[in-house]
Image (tube, rainbow, N blue to C red):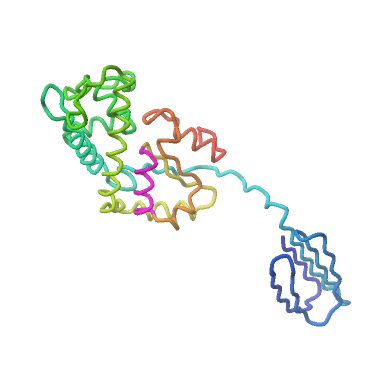
Amino acid sequence: RLRTTLATGYMLRLLLALATADALLLLAPRRLASRRAGLASMTLEISPPDGFVWGVNLDEGSPPPPSPPPSAALLFDCDGVLVETEELHRVAYNMAFEEFGLQIAGAPVVWSKEYYSFLANTVGGGKPKMRYHFTGLGAPEGARTHQDTAKVWPAPTARGGAVPADEAAGMALVDELQDFKTECYKQLVTKAGPRPGVLALMDSAIAAPGIAVGICSASTRGGFEKVVDAVVGQERLARLDVVIAGDDVSRKKPHPEIYNVAAQRLRLSRAD
Protein backbone atom coordinates (compact mmCIF):
# COMPACT_ATOMS: atom_id res chain seq x y z
CA ARG A 1 0.00 0.00 0.00
CA LEU A 2 1.25 3.48 -0.78
CA ARG A 3 -0.51 6.32 1.05
CA THR A 4 0.36 9.95 0.40
CA THR A 5 -0.87 13.06 2.13
CA LEU A 6 0.17 16.45 0.81
CA ALA A 7 -0.43 19.38 3.20
CA THR A 8 0.93 22.84 2.32
CA GLY A 9 2.22 22.76 -1.24
CA TYR A 10 5.61 21.60 -0.13
CA MET A 11 7.49 19.78 -2.93
CA LEU A 12 9.52 16.67 -2.30
CA ARG A 13 11.33 14.51 -4.82
CA LEU A 14 11.46 10.86 -3.90
CA LEU A 15 13.09 7.93 -5.64
CA LEU A 16 12.29 4.58 -4.11
CA ALA A 17 14.14 1.52 -5.38
CA LEU A 18 13.43 -1.88 -3.88
CA ALA A 19 16.05 -4.59 -4.00
CA THR A 20 14.95 -7.83 -2.33
CA ALA A 21 13.93 -6.88 1.23
CA ASP A 22 15.99 -3.65 1.39
CA ALA A 23 15.04 -0.15 0.29
CA LEU A 24 17.30 2.62 -0.94
CA LEU A 25 15.88 6.10 -0.42
CA LEU A 26 17.29 9.20 -2.06
CA LEU A 27 15.55 12.23 -0.55
CA ALA A 28 15.77 16.01 -0.45
CA PRO A 29 17.26 16.87 2.95
CA ARG A 30 14.57 16.31 5.57
CA ARG A 31 14.18 14.45 8.82
CA LEU A 32 13.75 10.73 8.14
CA ALA A 33 12.48 8.26 10.68
CA SER A 34 12.31 4.63 9.62
CA ARG A 35 11.04 1.57 11.35
CA ARG A 36 11.57 -1.89 10.00
CA ALA A 37 9.66 -4.91 11.19
CA GLY A 38 11.17 -8.05 9.69
CA LEU A 39 11.88 -8.48 6.01
CA ALA A 40 8.30 -8.52 4.82
CA SER A 41 7.15 -5.18 6.22
CA MET A 42 8.62 -1.67 6.27
CA THR A 43 7.12 1.66 7.33
CA LEU A 44 8.71 4.99 6.41
CA GLU A 45 7.50 8.36 7.62
CA ILE A 46 8.72 11.80 6.57
CA SER A 47 7.48 14.80 8.59
CA PRO A 48 9.14 18.07 7.48
CA PRO A 49 8.64 21.25 9.60
CA ASP A 50 6.23 22.80 7.10
CA GLY A 51 3.62 20.15 7.66
CA PHE A 52 4.36 17.90 4.72
CA VAL A 53 3.59 14.28 5.58
CA TRP A 54 4.43 11.34 3.36
CA GLY A 55 3.58 7.89 4.64
CA VAL A 56 4.77 4.72 2.95
CA ASN A 57 3.66 1.31 4.11
CA LEU A 58 5.01 -1.66 2.21
CA ASP A 59 3.71 -4.94 3.53
CA GLU A 60 4.44 -7.88 1.28
CA GLY A 61 2.81 -10.26 3.72
CA SER A 62 -0.66 -8.72 3.42
CA PRO A 63 -2.63 -9.72 0.32
CA PRO A 64 -4.63 -7.03 -1.47
CA PRO A 65 -8.30 -6.84 -0.51
CA PRO A 66 -10.54 -9.07 -2.66
CA SER A 67 -12.10 -7.36 -5.64
CA PRO A 68 -15.89 -7.09 -5.65
CA PRO A 69 -17.73 -9.72 -7.72
CA PRO A 70 -18.80 -8.74 -11.23
CA SER A 71 -22.37 -7.70 -11.89
CA ALA A 72 -22.62 -9.74 -15.12
CA ALA A 73 -20.62 -12.13 -17.28
CA LEU A 74 -20.06 -12.67 -21.00
CA LEU A 75 -19.17 -16.32 -21.65
CA PHE A 76 -18.02 -17.44 -25.09
CA ASP A 77 -18.38 -20.92 -26.50
CA CYS A 78 -15.47 -22.01 -28.66
CA ASP A 79 -16.80 -24.08 -31.55
CA GLY A 80 -19.02 -22.01 -33.80
CA VAL A 81 -18.63 -18.85 -31.67
CA LEU A 82 -14.93 -17.99 -31.36
CA VAL A 83 -14.00 -20.02 -34.40
CA GLU A 84 -15.87 -22.01 -37.01
CA THR A 85 -14.60 -25.50 -36.15
CA GLU A 86 -17.60 -27.74 -36.72
CA GLU A 87 -16.31 -29.01 -40.06
CA LEU A 88 -12.83 -29.55 -38.63
CA HIS A 89 -14.29 -31.73 -35.87
CA ARG A 90 -16.29 -33.75 -38.40
CA VAL A 91 -13.22 -34.34 -40.59
CA ALA A 92 -11.16 -35.35 -37.53
CA TYR A 93 -13.80 -37.88 -36.42
CA ASN A 94 -13.91 -39.42 -39.88
CA MET A 95 -10.10 -39.61 -39.89
CA ALA A 96 -10.27 -41.56 -36.62
CA PHE A 97 -13.02 -43.85 -37.92
CA GLU A 98 -10.92 -44.59 -41.02
CA GLU A 99 -7.76 -45.18 -38.97
CA PHE A 100 -9.58 -47.77 -36.83
CA GLY A 101 -11.35 -49.26 -39.86
CA LEU A 102 -14.78 -48.84 -38.24
CA GLN A 103 -17.49 -50.80 -40.01
CA ILE A 104 -21.12 -51.59 -39.32
CA ALA A 105 -22.65 -54.39 -41.36
CA GLY A 106 -19.66 -54.22 -43.69
CA ALA A 107 -20.03 -50.49 -44.44
CA PRO A 108 -17.51 -47.87 -43.21
CA VAL A 109 -18.61 -45.44 -40.51
CA VAL A 110 -18.67 -41.93 -41.96
CA TRP A 111 -20.41 -38.86 -40.55
CA SER A 112 -21.87 -36.58 -43.24
CA LYS A 113 -22.06 -32.81 -42.85
CA GLU A 114 -25.81 -32.96 -42.38
CA TYR A 115 -25.61 -35.72 -39.76
CA TYR A 116 -22.76 -34.08 -37.83
CA SER A 117 -24.77 -30.85 -37.71
CA PHE A 118 -27.58 -32.88 -36.13
CA LEU A 119 -25.19 -34.42 -33.59
CA ALA A 120 -23.65 -31.05 -32.72
CA ASN A 121 -27.09 -29.64 -31.96
CA THR A 122 -28.29 -32.68 -30.02
CA VAL A 123 -25.42 -34.00 -27.88
CA GLY A 124 -22.55 -32.04 -26.33
CA GLY A 125 -19.00 -33.37 -26.20
CA GLY A 126 -17.14 -35.80 -28.44
CA LYS A 127 -17.46 -39.02 -26.46
CA PRO A 128 -21.19 -38.48 -25.79
CA LYS A 129 -21.68 -37.94 -29.54
CA MET A 130 -20.08 -41.27 -30.35
CA ARG A 131 -21.94 -43.05 -27.57
CA TYR A 132 -25.20 -41.63 -28.87
CA HIS A 133 -24.41 -42.64 -32.44
CA PHE A 134 -23.51 -46.21 -31.53
CA THR A 135 -26.18 -46.80 -28.85
CA GLY A 136 -28.87 -44.15 -29.27
CA LEU A 137 -28.36 -43.22 -25.60
CA GLY A 138 -27.46 -39.91 -24.01
CA ALA A 139 -29.59 -37.38 -25.86
CA PRO A 140 -31.75 -34.98 -23.82
CA GLU A 141 -35.31 -36.09 -23.20
CA GLY A 142 -37.53 -35.14 -26.09
CA ALA A 143 -34.64 -34.61 -28.53
CA ARG A 144 -35.38 -35.36 -32.15
CA THR A 145 -33.88 -38.46 -33.72
CA HIS A 146 -32.04 -39.07 -36.99
CA GLN A 147 -32.18 -42.01 -39.39
CA ASP A 148 -28.37 -42.16 -39.64
CA THR A 149 -27.94 -42.97 -35.94
CA ALA A 150 -26.49 -46.50 -35.98
CA LYS A 151 -27.56 -47.73 -32.51
CA VAL A 152 -25.07 -50.57 -32.77
CA TRP A 153 -21.39 -50.86 -31.86
CA PRO A 154 -18.97 -50.94 -34.83
CA ALA A 155 -16.23 -53.40 -35.62
CA PRO A 156 -12.75 -51.81 -35.54
CA THR A 157 -11.45 -53.88 -38.44
CA ALA A 158 -8.01 -52.28 -38.39
CA ARG A 159 -7.62 -52.99 -34.66
CA GLY A 160 -8.56 -56.64 -34.34
CA GLY A 161 -12.09 -56.45 -35.67
CA ALA A 162 -13.99 -57.54 -32.54
CA VAL A 163 -17.30 -55.77 -31.98
CA PRO A 164 -17.54 -54.53 -28.35
CA ALA A 165 -19.47 -57.06 -26.30
CA ASP A 166 -21.00 -54.52 -23.91
CA GLU A 167 -21.09 -50.79 -23.17
CA ALA A 168 -17.92 -50.92 -21.06
CA ALA A 169 -15.98 -52.35 -24.00
CA GLY A 170 -17.71 -49.95 -26.35
CA MET A 171 -16.75 -46.93 -24.25
CA ALA A 172 -13.15 -48.18 -24.11
CA LEU A 173 -13.19 -48.07 -27.92
CA VAL A 174 -14.73 -44.59 -27.78
CA ASP A 175 -11.89 -43.46 -25.51
CA GLU A 176 -9.31 -44.64 -28.06
CA LEU A 177 -11.20 -43.04 -30.93
CA GLN A 178 -11.45 -39.74 -29.07
CA ASP A 179 -7.72 -39.69 -28.30
CA PHE A 180 -6.84 -40.24 -31.97
CA LYS A 181 -9.48 -37.75 -33.14
CA THR A 182 -8.03 -35.10 -30.79
CA GLU A 183 -4.57 -35.49 -32.31
CA CYS A 184 -6.04 -35.16 -35.81
CA TYR A 185 -7.98 -32.08 -34.74
CA LYS A 186 -4.90 -30.42 -33.27
CA GLN A 187 -3.27 -30.57 -36.69
CA LEU A 188 -6.34 -29.32 -38.54
CA VAL A 189 -7.16 -26.45 -36.19
CA THR A 190 -3.87 -24.63 -36.80
CA LYS A 191 -5.47 -23.42 -40.04
CA ALA A 192 -8.54 -21.96 -38.30
CA GLY A 193 -9.09 -18.25 -37.65
CA PRO A 194 -11.48 -16.28 -35.41
CA ARG A 195 -14.98 -15.47 -36.59
CA PRO A 196 -15.35 -11.86 -37.77
CA GLY A 197 -15.73 -9.37 -34.92
CA VAL A 198 -15.59 -11.87 -32.07
CA LEU A 199 -12.19 -10.80 -30.69
CA ALA A 200 -13.19 -7.11 -30.83
CA LEU A 201 -16.31 -8.00 -28.83
CA MET A 202 -14.21 -9.91 -26.30
CA ASP A 203 -11.77 -7.00 -25.92
CA SER A 204 -14.63 -4.55 -25.37
CA ALA A 205 -16.10 -6.77 -22.68
CA ILE A 206 -12.72 -7.20 -20.97
CA ALA A 207 -12.33 -3.40 -20.85
CA ALA A 208 -15.85 -2.83 -19.50
CA PRO A 209 -16.03 -2.45 -15.69
CA GLY A 210 -18.18 -4.93 -13.79
CA ILE A 211 -18.28 -7.54 -16.57
CA ALA A 212 -16.49 -10.87 -16.20
CA VAL A 213 -15.36 -12.53 -19.42
CA GLY A 214 -14.67 -16.20 -20.01
CA ILE A 215 -14.78 -19.20 -22.31
CA CYS A 216 -16.94 -22.30 -21.70
CA SER A 217 -16.43 -25.07 -24.24
CA ALA A 218 -17.73 -28.63 -24.38
CA SER A 219 -14.54 -29.67 -26.18
CA THR A 220 -11.92 -31.71 -24.35
CA ARG A 221 -9.09 -29.62 -22.98
CA GLY A 222 -6.53 -31.26 -25.27
CA GLY A 223 -8.19 -29.97 -28.41
CA PHE A 224 -9.71 -26.86 -26.85
CA GLU A 225 -6.40 -25.39 -25.65
CA LYS A 226 -4.90 -25.70 -29.11
CA VAL A 227 -7.76 -23.64 -30.53
CA VAL A 228 -7.76 -20.84 -27.96
CA ASP A 229 -3.97 -20.56 -27.96
CA ALA A 230 -3.95 -20.11 -31.73
CA VAL A 231 -7.08 -17.99 -32.10
CA VAL A 232 -7.47 -16.02 -28.87
CA GLY A 233 -3.77 -15.74 -27.96
CA GLN A 234 -1.97 -16.09 -24.64
CA GLU A 235 -2.00 -12.37 -23.83
CA ARG A 236 -5.78 -12.10 -24.17
CA LEU A 237 -6.34 -15.43 -22.40
CA ALA A 238 -4.42 -14.14 -19.38
CA ARG A 239 -6.99 -11.35 -19.02
CA LEU A 240 -10.00 -13.68 -18.90
CA ASP A 241 -11.77 -14.37 -15.61
CA VAL A 242 -12.67 -18.02 -16.22
CA VAL A 243 -11.88 -20.73 -18.79
CA ILE A 244 -13.69 -24.08 -18.54
CA ALA A 245 -13.42 -27.09 -20.86
CA GLY A 246 -15.65 -30.12 -21.22
CA ASP A 247 -13.32 -32.19 -19.03
CA ASP A 248 -14.10 -29.91 -16.08
CA VAL A 249 -17.77 -30.92 -15.81
CA SER A 250 -19.58 -34.24 -15.66
CA ARG A 251 -22.62 -33.26 -17.75
CA LYS A 252 -22.11 -31.87 -21.23
CA LYS A 253 -24.06 -29.24 -23.13
CA PRO A 254 -26.92 -28.66 -23.64
CA HIS A 255 -27.00 -29.29 -19.87
CA PRO A 256 -26.21 -25.94 -18.16
CA GLU A 257 -23.66 -27.36 -15.70
CA ILE A 258 -20.68 -25.69 -17.37
CA TYR A 259 -22.34 -22.27 -17.06
CA ASN A 260 -23.39 -22.95 -13.47
CA VAL A 261 -19.77 -23.80 -12.62
CA ALA A 262 -18.63 -20.58 -14.30
CA ALA A 263 -21.19 -18.54 -12.32
CA GLN A 264 -20.00 -20.15 -9.08
CA ARG A 265 -16.34 -19.38 -9.80
CA LEU A 266 -17.25 -15.79 -10.69
CA ARG A 267 -19.42 -15.38 -7.57
CA LEU A 268 -22.45 -14.67 -9.72
CA SER A 269 -25.97 -15.95 -9.25
CA ARG A 270 -27.37 -17.87 -12.18
CA ALA A 271 -29.92 -15.11 -12.67
CA ASP A 272 -27.07 -12.71 -13.52
Q: Position of residue 87 (x, y in %)?
A: 22, 42
Residue at the outermost right position: 49
Classify 267 as above or below 235. above
The image quadrant where one finds the N terminus is bottom right
Q: Which residues are magenta?
A: 219-232
Q: In percent of the image, x 34 and y 53: which residue is there?
A: 231
Q: Main secondary structure of the magenta part?
A: helix
Residue 109: x and y in percent read 16, 30
Question: Is residue 224 a member of the stretch shown in magenta?
Answer: yes
Towards the viewer: 1 or 94: 94
Which residue is pictured at 45% across the width and 52% down the height? 237
Q: How many marks?
A: 0
Taking 229 as reference, is 130 left or right? Answer: left
Q: Nearer the viewer, residue 245 or 54?
A: 245
Q: Of 208 and 162, which appears nearest the observer?
A: 162
Residue 166 highlighted magenta (yes or no): no
Does 141 sit left or right of 106 as displayed? right
Residue extending farthest to the front is: 160
